[in-house]
Image (cartoon, rainbow, N blue to C red):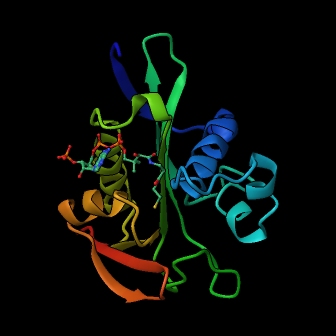
Amino acid sequence: MSGYRLRDAGPGDGIALTEALVEAANWNSDRQRPRVQVLADPVRRRYIASWPRPGDAGVIAVDDEGGPIGACWFRLFPADRPGLAGIAGVPELILGVRPVWRAQGVGRAMLAAVLGKAAAAGHSRVSLSVDKGNFAQRLYISEGFTVVSSTPTTDIMVRTVR
Ligand SMILES: CC(C)(COP(=O)(O)OP(=O)(O)OC[C@H]1O[C@@H](n2cnc3c(N)ncnc32)[C@H](O)[C@@H]1OP(=O)(O)O)[C@@H](O)C(=O)NCCC(=O)NCCS
């Protein structure tokens, strides 16, 4: 692949975020769900609804032509309408990279950038939900996330950001 760069996610990036949300939901190549089915899930839709809301922040990775190849962002949910991680007062992070661009450092670069944004926004922690068996967890552990709770299928991970 050729080069990529990161830029801040803005109001026009709803489609890029949606694509990354679908990639994240479909991380397991043996269990691919149609895009429409992923987006029909009311909890998953919460991560992109009305993007950007006050307090949202993220980055888009773009290729040499400026086309989006991945996205990473965080959103703070109200306690009565949580996301998948569900820790009150702690924003949740979503990360996805297009398949042909994976394993080239894009995900780690976006994650580092967004952790910096969370700290700059005054958050003390960020959270995420990751399915057991998803190698993304290796990335999260190597970037300082720890598991704070689990179900039989999912780990909730948290990282201190300042
Ligand atoms: C998870 C994901 C975002 C990582 O982004 P990426 O650009 O592929 O990752 P990077 O190249 O930055 O690699 C970061 C680390 O991830 C792990 N990793 C990446 N590709 C891997 C692979 N094919 N097999 C095993 N581990 C891998 C490694 O630990 C790697 O660190 P290293 O390069 O020091 O060994 C990306 O693969 C993706 O979009 N996956 C599908 C969606 C998803 O699972 N999102 C997260 C949901 S919680």
Q: How many marks?
A: 0
Q: Position of residue 108 (x, y in %)?
A: 28, 45
Q: Quick check: 76 above or below 143?
A: below
Residue occupying the point 49% across, 68% down: 92
Towards the viewer: 43 or 35: 35
Q: Quick check: 10 above or below 24?
A: above
Q: Quick check: 1 above or below 76?
A: above
Q: Position of residue 117 (x, y in %)?
A: 37, 53
Q: Position of residue 73 (x, y in %)?
A: 49, 52
Which quadrant holds residue 1?
top left
Residue occupying the point 34% across, 87% down: 148
Q: Quadrant of the C terminus?
A: bottom left
Query: Left or right: where does residue 60 sit relative to residue 33?
Result: left
Most distant residue in the front direction: 30
Q: Is residue 75 visible?
A: yes
Towards the viewer: 54 or 31: 31
Residue occupying the point 50% across, 35% down: 98
Q: Is residue 124 visible?
A: no
Residue occupying the point 61% across, 74% down: 83
Query: Left or right: where does residue 92 sit relative to residue 36?
Result: left
Q: Quick check: 123 above or below 13?
A: below
Query: Left or right: where does residue 18 sit relative to residue 149?
Result: right
Towards the viewer: 88 or 105: 105
Which quadrant holds residue 105?
top left
Query: Left or right: where does residue 114 sit relative to residue 65?
Result: left
